[in-house]
Image: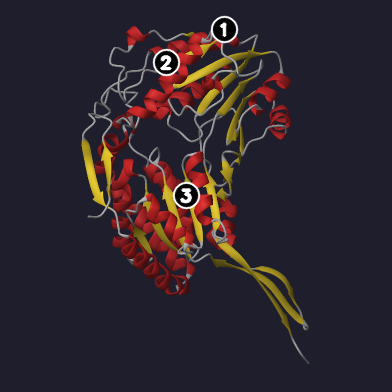
Amino acid sequence: MNAQVQCISPIDGRVYATRDCLTQAQASDAAAAARAAQKPWAARPLSERIDLVLKGVANIGAMNDDIVPELAHQMGRPIRYGGEFGGFEERATHMARIAEQALVPIAVEDSGDFKRHITREPQGVVLVIAPWNYPYMTAINTVAPALIAGNSVVLKHASQTLLVGERMARAFHAAGIPGDVFQNLFLSHDTTSALIGARAFDFVNFTGSVSGGRAIERAAAGTFTGLGLELGGKDPGYVAEDADLDAAVDTLIDGAMFNSGQCCCGIERLYVHHSRFDAFVDKAVQIVSGYRLGDPLDPDTTLGPMAQTRFADLVREQTSEAIAAGATALIDPAMFSNDGGAYLMPQILINVDHSMRVMREESFGPVVGIMPVADDAEAIALMNDSDYGLTASIWTADTARAEAIGAQLETGTVFMNRADYLDPALCWTGCKDTGRGGGLSVIGYHNLTRPKSYHLRKLP
């Protein structure tokens, strides 16, 4: 009997969907089919590949009314937020728009003696291992440019959102992309590792936990397979004394709590200039106290359950430990009587420090610690005091100041007066335990292709 993957709905703890995993032999055959289909796909004109991908994207948009409640059942996001199609389309459309520029050969010389240039060739077969928290947007980050660049793609989606890959395959196949060029496969961890170790793929893009990233690296060891890894995060925000306080509170608290805090670049720790600290905290408490925790299928719900009870329990542990060590919780539990299981009330903590796990380890839930700081130097030191480096959000009226602070931060993206957003025109990347590589932008295309140099000598 084949191994199975199950989606347990966080709404009620019931099995929402089950799928059989491929056997090792079946998975190897699927990877071989992807390889056989890749070169004919790459031989098609770039404009044709772009058109087919964009048709597939439009097909997903046509499914959105079904996708939104389906996502609520799978991972708990409230239906009031309307799903992910806006970001999904924005990212795919941008990558389509810049494809010709990103993939054009680099001309070095074309004279009477030599023709020298560098081309970009597709990697070959790209494995995309996508997460559950933003299952459509994170997948399209790599799927769209990989297909456009001429790769074939194998998608392995998280078990929590196992219906997402099926919908994407249906949409792209209906658009005219061949079935072997884009495949959605249900694979066990062992089978996935075995395929990577057997060089079934030429590039692997993984978004997930640090431990998952290490497992991918171990599987690829010695194969020289290219890897793109977006792993954990503990993204900070800094509010300087000249910040627009209302805008800072609105954006940073939303960045900490939206999607029940389950955002790759969500805000997990805040540092506020001491002169603005009390006012910031008061406004933050007012906002969070107005949230409604409940059934994500209810249009009035603003905060749904976390994807799994164990994720919520981790945040509860971090919060309880911090309070026991002297932190002060500012949100009254009486306001959220339905807290329990995967349903986790939001929390704001003050009197926190970096000895506490809630300020040091990834929480990935609706909790944020806030600390006062004396100046930029203290804020920089605290923001850098982390094993992670995905994004950092700086709030100030001075662009030069933000750039100077950003230059000293160990992070992949520096925001000024913004947070929790992925700009497809910029490289999505990280450092330290957040991982390596870069997606989207022109650089995303560079990682999904390999350079080939031509040195052509013209004899008399």
Residue 113, by quadrant, is bottom right
Q: Position of residue 183 (x, y in %)?
A: 35, 60
In terms of depth relative to the viewer, which is nearer, 358 or 59? Answer: 358
C-alpha span from label 2 to label 1: 16 Å
Q: Amino acid at mark 1?
A: Asp
Residue at disc 1, secondary structure: helix
Work out whether residue 389 can be spotted.
yes
The 10 Å Cα crowd at callout 3, few under 14, some 14 to 19, many 20 or more, is many
Which label is found at residue 210? none
Residue at disc 2, secondary structure: helix
Q: Which badge, 3 or 2, comes first in the chain's sequence?
A: 3
Q: Position of residue 421 (x, y in %)?
A: 51, 36
Q: Which badge, 1 or 3, comes first in the chain's sequence?
A: 3
Work out whether residue 177 can be spotted.
no
Q: Quadrant of the C terminus?
A: bottom right
The colour scheme applied to this rendered structure is: secondary structure
Residue 286, by quadrant, is top left
Residue bearing the label numbered 1: 278
Residue bearing the label numbered 2: 288
Q: Amino acid at mark 2?
A: Val
Q: Which badge, 2 or 1, comes first in the chain's sequence?
A: 1
At horizontal 42% and vertical 25% (from top left) the residue drawn is 314
Q: Are marks 3 and 2 in contact (CB under 8 Å)?
A: no
Residue bearing the label numbered 3: 141
